[in-house]
Amino acid sequence: MVIWSEEAKRDLRGIYDYIARESKIYAQQVADNVVAQSMDVDKMPRRYRMMPELEDDAVREFSIYSYRVIFEIMTDHIYVLAVAHKRQNIMADDINSKREQ
């Protein structure tokens, strides 16, 4: 099962809003595709690359369009932590603060 954090939902909403300024249709397509790909992560989560900034085997990511979808492999589910533009500088502390306790 894949669960999206509130922060990740806000990230995706911000991406949608930004793209929607030019095209609501394309914004919806991007958002739908990001969510759809994230829902497949739980089938084989370790096939995705480890997030290099964190060097934690449980925190991984996949790329779609210009974005990184960062997730944590939990015992009974996948937890989507963030969606960030590939050019965004992400620090380990940023991701650690989003992880489930």
Image (spheres, helix red, strand yellow):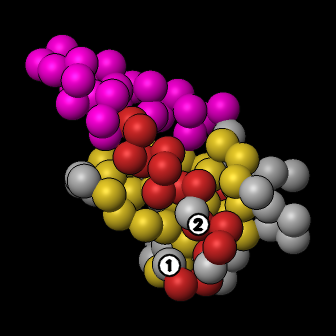
Q: What x and y, as percent, mark residue 49?
A: 47, 80
Is residue 89 among what the camera can see? no
Badge 2 is on which residue? 41
Q: Are marks 1 and 2 in contact (CB under 8 Å)?
A: yes
Magenta span: chief secondary structure: helix
Looking at the image, the residue that sits furthest to the top is 21
For the N terminus, the quadrant is bottom right
Q: What x and y, as percent, mark residue 84?
A: 39, 47
Badge 1 is on which residue? 48
Q: What x and y, as percent, mark residue 24?
A: 24, 18
Query: What are the residue bounds of the magenta stretch?
Result: 6-30
Using the image, determine if residue 89 lies above or below residue 52.
Answer: above
**Residue 12: within the magenta?**
yes
Using the image, determine if residue 101 lies above or below residue 8.
Answer: below
**Residue drawn where x is 43% and y is 67% of the image:** 62
Residue type marked 2: Val
